[in-house]
Image (cartoon, coloured by chain):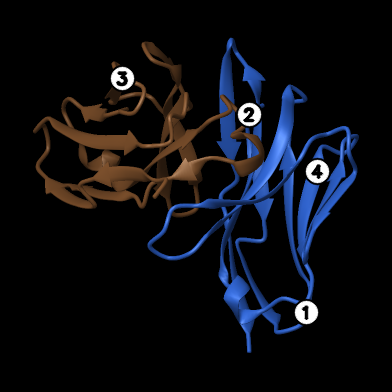
Amino acid sequence: EAQVTQNPRYLITVTGKKLTVTCSQNMNHEYMSWYRQDPGLGLRQIYYSMNVEVTDKGDVPEGYKVSRKEKRNFPLILESPSPNQTSLYFCASSYSSGTGGKNGYTFGSGTRLTVV
Amino acid sequence: QQQVKQSPQSLIVQKGGISIINCAYENTAFDYFPWYQQFPGKGPALLIAIRPDVSEKKEGRFTISFNKSAKQFSLHIMDSQPGDSATYFCAAIGALGGGFKTIFGAGTRLFVKA
């Protein structure tokens, strides 16, 4: 089944403890992206990657890192999480870079992160 | 300049009625405007999309109307059904500031009463 897999689905952590949220897609998509979803703010883009080894900042990159060493994986790293990073995170991918093409972005099921 | 304003925040419609959600953008560099539908516990999924060279696009019960001069676009759901109850996000995509940006609206929670 074509999908974007995020892990973990739920995570509670403490301030300052480094964490990684993994994202993997099995559709050979070139474009991958991370978003955070907060009530009243919608989805805000954190980072995106047009292809392997090519990443760029979205609207809210502060406090996050990403890497794209392989086409299928695009992990999101929080080096020193803070409570304001408590949110619902989505990874997305698409074959057509940028717009998502006729099928749009394929989103993962989300990771709910709580930082205490 | 990169904001996308979406309204209303929430909407209640009777079964069979028309649901209308509006979005406005500011930056004319945006050139692709999709709508995404999200059910609870799921990621968003593409519903319908339009480019600014077209004023209207229809797919089944879903229609996008696009007003380039006003920098506004809207989603119309005809014959709304309880199964349409979900959160809807508009988005604007384009090459901005040397990169490719996707800006989503804040979302509209639609509830269709049976």
Please report, as a chain letter, where disc 1 is located. Answer: B
Residue occupied by mark 2: B2
Residue occupied by mark 1: B17
The kind of residue on which mark 1 rests is Gly
Secondary structure at badge 3 equals loop
Q: Can residue B61 be spotted in the picture?
A: yes
Residue A5, percent from left and from top: 31, 44
Residue occupied by mark 4: B72
The reply to whether label 3 and label 1 mark residues of one chain is no
Rendered position, B36 above or below A79: below
The kind of residue on which mark 2 rests is Gln
Label pair 3/2, CB-CB below 8 angstroms: no
Residue occupied by mark 3: A70
What's the distance in space between the residues labelled 3 and 2, CA to CA? Answer: 31 Å
The crowding category of the residue bearing disc 2, from other C-alpha atoms within 10 Å (few below 14, some 14 to 19, many at least 20), is some
Rendered position, A23 above or below A62: below
Q: Earlier in the sequence, mark 1 or mark 4?
A: 1
Of marks 3 and 1, the one in the foreground: 3
Give the residue drawn at x 47%, y 24%.
A30
Residue A49, percent from left and from top: 44, 21
What's the distance in space between the residues labelled 4 and 3, CA to CA? Answer: 39 Å
The chain painted brown is A
